[in-house]
Image: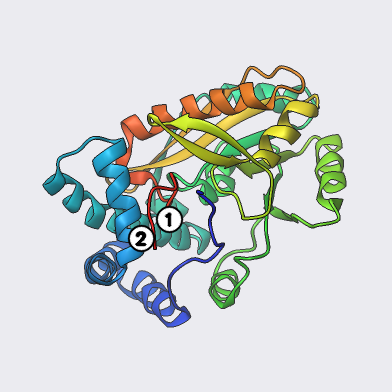
């Protein structure tokens, strides 16, 4: 089963070293140090190595040697997006350039004054979206629906060095009170963002093919988005060379209470992104449920 355990890698000390380098020597110096960190991950993280190698070899159909090479490049690219997020959050947004593809979708969404649901995935660097959208003066507020499993010392540290974010977090709770918070945010013409590609054991899931093989997806985002009568947009912020980012926004066709249909459309959008940016698939676990411990 393709559930995620809610844990991310890294230590507070490691992040402090990168923040020091970014502040004192610049972003590219942090990229240089990242070569060594990515090498460590490539050598020692056997379980995540197997998972991401499977993605490249079996789902992207690369050769054995190319897949091995892409595993290292995947870690390095993920590290770059983390460094970029820290840099942008710490006030270095002017070091980056931005490109908008489908921004009129978000402008129209806000003009309708119904609020809207954004569905993204663990590809690219969606966490910089608030800084990204701020560049075009959209009057918006993003509410990020998440679990509290990733609340950690690392997150606390990053919050201490970053500028105060405008993103509000809606924590998923067993008593379903987060549903009321989502409705309240939409009533205020705010945007509610969910990710549709990771689920936790014990929660409801939906099964569908992605990249040619069946996998499990969290049912919650698609149930919510197909039942609330508001626009739904798939949004991704993808890293490109030379400190450049590209935002993609595509409005979904939503039929009421058709969560399965919405999931299929979501998968098509994710596959489109992965065709253009195969390195930026950042699910380092047994997504397709093919491995045995």
- Left of 291 or right of it: where is 148? right
The span from disc 2 to disc 1 (Cα, nearest Å) is: 6 Å
- Left of 1 or right of it: where is 109? right
CB contact under 8 Å: marks 2 and 1: yes
Name the spot of residue 223 as percent of width and height, x first: 73, 33
Give the mark nearer the N terminus: 2 vs 1: 2
Q: Identify the image quadrant of the C terminus.
A: bottom left
Name the spot of residue 64 as percent of width and height, x first: 15, 46
- Left of 102 or right of it: where is 284? left
Is residue 68 positioned above or below 228 on the image? below
Is 44 or 20 nearer to us in this picture? 44
Is residue 211 positioned above or below 284 on the image? above
Which numbered tag is attached to residue 48?
2
Name the spot of residue 141 as percent of width and height, x first: 71, 44
Which numbered tag is attached to residue 154?
none
For label 1, the crowd category at 10 Å Cα-Cα, with few meaning under 14, some 14 to 19 and many 20 or more, is some
Which numbered tag is attached to residue 285?
1
Q: Secondary structure at mark 2?
A: helix
Q: Is residue 165 visible?
A: yes
Is 226 or 237 nearer to us in this picture? 226
Tell me the residue at 59%/49% (across/down).
199
């Amino acid at each position: 089963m393709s559930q995620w355990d809610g844990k991310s890698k890294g230590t507070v000390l490691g992040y402090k070293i990168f923040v020091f380098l970014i502040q004192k020597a610049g972003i590219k110096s942090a990229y240089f140090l990242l070569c060594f960190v990515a090498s460590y991950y490539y050598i020692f993280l056997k379980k995540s190595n197997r998972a991401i190698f499977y993605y490249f070899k079996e789902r992207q159909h690369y050769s054995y040697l190319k897949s091995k090479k892409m595993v290292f490049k995947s870690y390095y690219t993920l590290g770059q997006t983390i460094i970029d997020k820290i840099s942008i959050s710490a006030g270095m947004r002017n070091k980056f350039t931005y490109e908008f593809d489908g921004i009129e979708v978000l402008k129209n969404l806000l003009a309708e004054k119904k609020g809207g649901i954004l569905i993204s995935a663990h590809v690219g660097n969606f966490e910089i979206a608030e800084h990204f959208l701020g560049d075009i003066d959209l009057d918006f507020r993003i509410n990020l629906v998440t679990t509290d499993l990733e609340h950690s010392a690392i997150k606390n540290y990053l919050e201490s060095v970053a500028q105060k974010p405008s993103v509000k977090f809606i924590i998923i709770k067993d008593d379903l009170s987060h549903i009321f918070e989502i409705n309240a945010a939409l009533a205020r013409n705010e945007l509610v963002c969910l990710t549709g590609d990771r689920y936790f054991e014990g929660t409801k899931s939906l099964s569908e093919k992605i990249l040619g093989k069946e996998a499990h997806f969290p049912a919650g985002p698609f149930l919510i988005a197909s039942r609330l009568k508001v626009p739904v947009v798939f949004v991704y912020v993808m890293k490109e060379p030379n400190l450049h980012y590209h935002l993609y926004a595509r409005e979904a066709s939503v039929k009421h209470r058709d969560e399965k249909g919405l999931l299929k459309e979501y998968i098509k959008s994710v596959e489109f992104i992965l065709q253009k940016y195969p390195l930026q698939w950042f699910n380092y676990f047994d997504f397709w449920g093919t491995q045995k411990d």
